[in-house]
Image (cartoon, coloured by chain):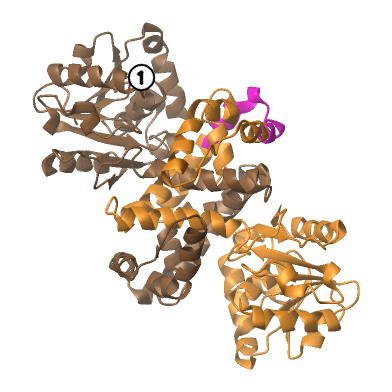
Chain colours: A brown, B orange
Amino acid sequence: MTRIAIVGAGIIGGSWALVFARAGHEVRVFDETPATRAAFMPRLEAMAAASLALAPGQGVAGIAAKVRVVDELAAALDGAAYVQESVPERREVKRPVLAAIDRLAPPEALIASSTSSFPLSTLVEALPGRARCLVVHPATPPHLLPVVELAPAPFTPEATVARARELMVAVGQTPVLVKRELPTFVMNRLQGVLLLEMFRLIREGYVSAEDADALIRDGFGLRWAFLGPLEGVDLNAPGGIADYLTRYGWIFDSMANEAGVEGKSVTPELVAELGGAMRAKLPLEKLGERTAWRDRSIAALRALRRDAGR
Amino acid sequence: MTRIAIVGAGIIGGSWALVFARAGHEVRVFDETPATRAAFMPRLEAMAAASLALAPGQGVAGIAAKVRVVDELAAALDGAAYVQESVPERREVKRPVLAAIDRLAPPEALIASSTSSFPLSTLVEALPGRARCLVVHPATPPHLLPVVELAPAPFTPEATVARARELMVAVGQTPVLVKRELPTFVMNRLQGVLLLEMFRLIREGYVSAEDADALIRDGFGLRWAFLGPLEGVDLNAPGGIADYLTRYGWIFDSMANEAGVEGKSVTPELVAELGGAMRAKLPLEKLGERTAWRDRSIAALRALRRDAGR
């Protein structure tokens, strides 16, 4: 059991509190707004109740008992081994809060920011404890969507990333490493390009908004609930993704060229890298078995949607 | 009950046969390769067995009894009310097959092509029966992923689109209209931009292939299994998507500008259109209820994944 401090008790902070509490950790929550503090526990309990399927064998009261809202930042940080900063997404708000956390938290505590847009170095470069700081950017909300981006700065030691990774795995999240700093990180860029293409196709009169949504919800979305897009492609050719991209890579290249990107997007180096990554996960002779698993999973999901009235 | 002809019995043709058979239609299948014909029924039965969750109250034998493989194109077309062409994705293969279908099919039969890339006018412009032709492009495979693109040519009458839409709804698919001709239609462009951005971020060293997949599979993919990306955004601001884009549209604009697209992507007209589409589906006062449904659905999906060993 690790003592966790949540600083900033909005949507993200509340969801983080639930992630840690249902994994058995003791959580202290601080928010500078008294009304937010007062409203916090009922909100946490409602979130816990709606997601008990993800906390087998636990009840709302047991989860809530792990969480305490406190009136002072120092009280939240007292004895904390891990701090998750989740204050509003404005640099001028986050910077002084992170500085205060660095000043007040126990020297061995890890300090994580939930920022969805600011590279770590733009938030903590000047802090004495910057080596123990890291961006740990969750999907929204983290108690439902497990993936989190770990985004270090050039000055961040490996050990800081390793400690955050270990804790995230232990609480059931899926940590992903953003290897180089970039604004908005990676996850939201993936959603961003998809939305931008939907916007364009709707603006230019090719498809309605409702139909654009259906193309994902009743199409790729059913597959991506089980497989990432790359693994999805990997199952669509007998020789896996390298085979697929060798045959159809030109389609992606020409789509990119049409959008103004010069040269090849599907380079031989990329094909080799993707092929290597997929084969390290799944040998070619297991492709059929994996495809059958995908198909059973999608059928089960559709049955679940039908029962849920969708 | 409608008599359906499937022409081309590969992956897509086989999956189409299952879609129609489990909906109670009589299906005749033709492929010009004898080995493909010989292998067809066992393959259909295996697909049916793996997806019985989508055919409640039915068994494999009952579904298979609806399907007959025939040795001649004319025998498949005999008495057909709807023809689904699913031969290999090469224009020089598809054009003569569609011409033969137009020549041999009953005059009132609708002729659909499964093409994933060729605009209808480039396939059937010269045919006497072009008015009864339509692209009906499925997700792959259609017996699992229900969405289909209906893509008419400028010369296609409304009634042809309406008939195809009606049949698709009746067999449990989700028809979507591609309002203007464009190569590759809309659905695969949505996957295309997402994959291209993953390729770029992997090539440039921001993220590994495995981690890029996880960002969708354990993030947005869990949401898009229930809600399209636009509806997903709609639930992320108190005032819905119009509110969201009024506040955060600049993020998308700057992402597009960074990628070389000039001007605004999130125009006031687009915001009005998206807001209108979402509010027509869901009044603002039901946003909270819908969000709670989303959260329960995602929790149930994650429990399903856990039980399926993922």
Q: Determine whether A176 is above or below B65 in the image.
A: above
Is the residue A212 above or below the residue A122 in the image? below
Label 1 element class:
loop
Picture coordinates of residue B78, whole percent (x, y): 85, 82
Give amino acid for label 1: Ala
- Residue B204 percent location from the top left of the image: 29, 54
**First to last magenta residue range:** B276-294
Residue position for label 1 = A9
Magenta span dominant secondary structure:
helix
Q: Is residue B275 left or right of residue A21?
A: right
Q: Quadrant of the N terminus of chain B?
A: bottom right
- Please give the name of the residue rendered at 21% of the width and 33% of the height, measured from the top-left corner: A121
Look at the image and tell me in which quarter the C terminus of chain B lies: bottom left
Q: Number of labelled discs?
A: 1
Please indicate, yes or no, whether residue B235 appears anywhere in the rendered image. Answer: yes
B281 part of magenta stretch: yes
